[in-house]
Image (cartoon, rainbow, N blue to C red):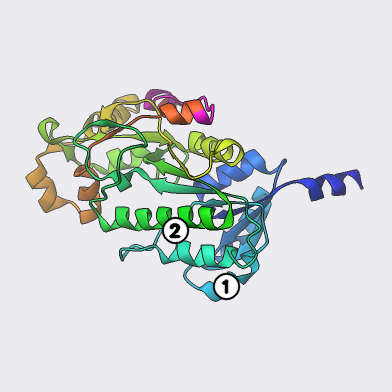
């Protein structure tokens, strides 16, 4: 009976987009929160349950499958990306419409992207920088952020927006930088290179947890480490630390002929993110304050 009463008193968290980072959050919170994970893939139900979350099958692209989300949780961690096309994010709109049916949610943490700023010419920027997305991908994120802020004001929910750069970890599927280097993907020549920003997947999960507890209402936070490296130098570091050949350097004109529009979009944007607000407001001390520590882990 004491265990049952304790479970009933635990706050409930609905995780939308419970992939690699979401599962890291589950690992951190499963003893203190009641966790519910939305998945559009029934084949993931067993894995989510084994990780410590209650699986719920639903699809953000199909509003009729989201009816059960209303009144289900005290807080929401929204990590699902927008669709791959269009100027808006209908998935976030569908989610908020479902949540609005009862309005129980008091806190929402959203994983956005630093791509909302577009190209900043390598400048060091903080969260007061105006958004200026250069791609439809960035504009979809701005749309999602705007909808979430509106929901927070309309329903009295504390909405925290996490603007996230490149996520990496050596145990992260799709986020192990050694794979890119081993594949031989080239990088820009030094004269054309751009600054990139990084966060280890474990530190991102910890930032999500900190935002659920201490995020201020309608606040934007950069979730990044303190590394200041250009993209080519970062992948050179990966190669050197793991005994791989350094990637070839090519000009921007050569990259335009060899790379996909998605790859080029990252190479057309240069900025350095300040993480001062993350440290000051969330009081988060990173496990991996630079990519050197993260690549050694």
Among the 4 quarters of the image, the one containing residue 168: top left
Q: Name the one closer to the observer, 160 or 267.
A: 160
Q: Which residue is mark 1?
A: 65
Q: Name the one closer to the observer, 24 or 119.
A: 119
Among the 4 quarters of the image, the one containing residue 125: top left
Residue at the farthest bottom position: 64
Residue at image point 71% right, 47% down: 11
Check whether the beta carbons of the residues at disc 1 and disc 2 lie within 8 A of each other.
Answer: no
Q: Between marks 1 and 2, how big is the CA–CA gap?
A: 20 Å
Q: Which residue is mark 2?
A: 147
Q: Name the one closer to the observer, 86 or 243.
A: 86
- Residue 194 percent across, percent down from the top left: 20, 35
Label 1 CA crowd tier, 10 Å (few <14, some 14–19, many 20+) = some
- Residue 177 percent across, percent down from the top left: 35, 38
Among the 4 quarters of the image, the one containing residue 32: top right
Residue at image point 53% right, 67% down: 97
Query: Does the magenta stretch mainly form a helix, a strand or a loop?
Result: loop
Among the two numbered marks 1 and 2 on one chain, the one whose residue lies closer to the N terminus: 1
Question: Does residue 22 show up?
Answer: yes
Query: SS at mark 2?
Result: helix
Label 2 CA crowd tier, 10 Å (few <14, some 14–19, many 20+) = some
Q: Is residue 134 magenta?
A: no
Q: Is residue 291 magenta?
A: yes
Q: Is residue 208 left or right of residue 50?
A: left
The answer to whether 19 is drawn above or below residue 185 in the figure is below
Number of dots carrying numbers: 2
Q: For the magenta stretch, what is the residue range?
A: 281-293
Question: Does residue 17 show up?
Answer: no
- Residue 270 percent across, percent down from the top left: 22, 37
Q: Is residue 97 left or right of residue 89?
A: right
Residue at the farthest right position: 1
- Residue 69 percent across, percent down from the top left: 62, 64
């Amino acid at each position: 009976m004491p265990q049952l009463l304790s479970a009933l008193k635990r706050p409930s968290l609905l995780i939308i987009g419970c992939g690699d980072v979401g599962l890291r959050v589950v690992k951190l919170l499963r003893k203190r929160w009641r966790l519910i994970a939305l998945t559009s893939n029934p084949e993931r139900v067993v894995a989510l349950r084994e990780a410590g979350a209650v699986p719920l099958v639903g699809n953000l692209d199909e509003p009729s499958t989201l009816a059960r989300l209303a009144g289900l949780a005290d807080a929401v961690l929204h990590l699902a990306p927008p669709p791959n096309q269009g100027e808006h994010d209908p998935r976030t709109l569908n989610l908020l419409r479902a949540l609005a049916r009862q309005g129980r949610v008091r806190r929402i943490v959203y994983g956005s992207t630093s791509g909302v700023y577009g190209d900043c010419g390598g400048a060091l920027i903080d969260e007061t920088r105006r958004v200026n997305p250069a791609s439809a991908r960035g504009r979809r994120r701005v749309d999602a952020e705007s909808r979430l802020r509106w929901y927070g004001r309309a329903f009295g929910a504390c909405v925290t927006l996490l603007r996230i750069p490149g996520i990496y970890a050596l145990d992260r599927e799709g986020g192990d930088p050694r794979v890119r280097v081993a594949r031989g993907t080239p990088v820009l020549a030094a004269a054309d290179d751009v600054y990139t920003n990084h966060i280890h997947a474990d530190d991102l999960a910890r930032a999500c947890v900190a935002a659920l507890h201490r995020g201020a209402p309608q606040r934007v936070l950069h979730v990044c480490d303190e590394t200041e490296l250009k993209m080519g130098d970062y992948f050179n570091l990966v190669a050197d630390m793991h005994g791989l050949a350094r990637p070839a350097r090519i000009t921007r004109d050569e990259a335009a002929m060899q790379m996909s529009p998605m790859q080029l979009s990252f190479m057309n944007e240069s900025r350095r993110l300040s993480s001062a607000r993350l440290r000051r407001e969330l009081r988060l001390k990173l496990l991996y304050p630079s990519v050197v520590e993260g690549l050694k882990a």
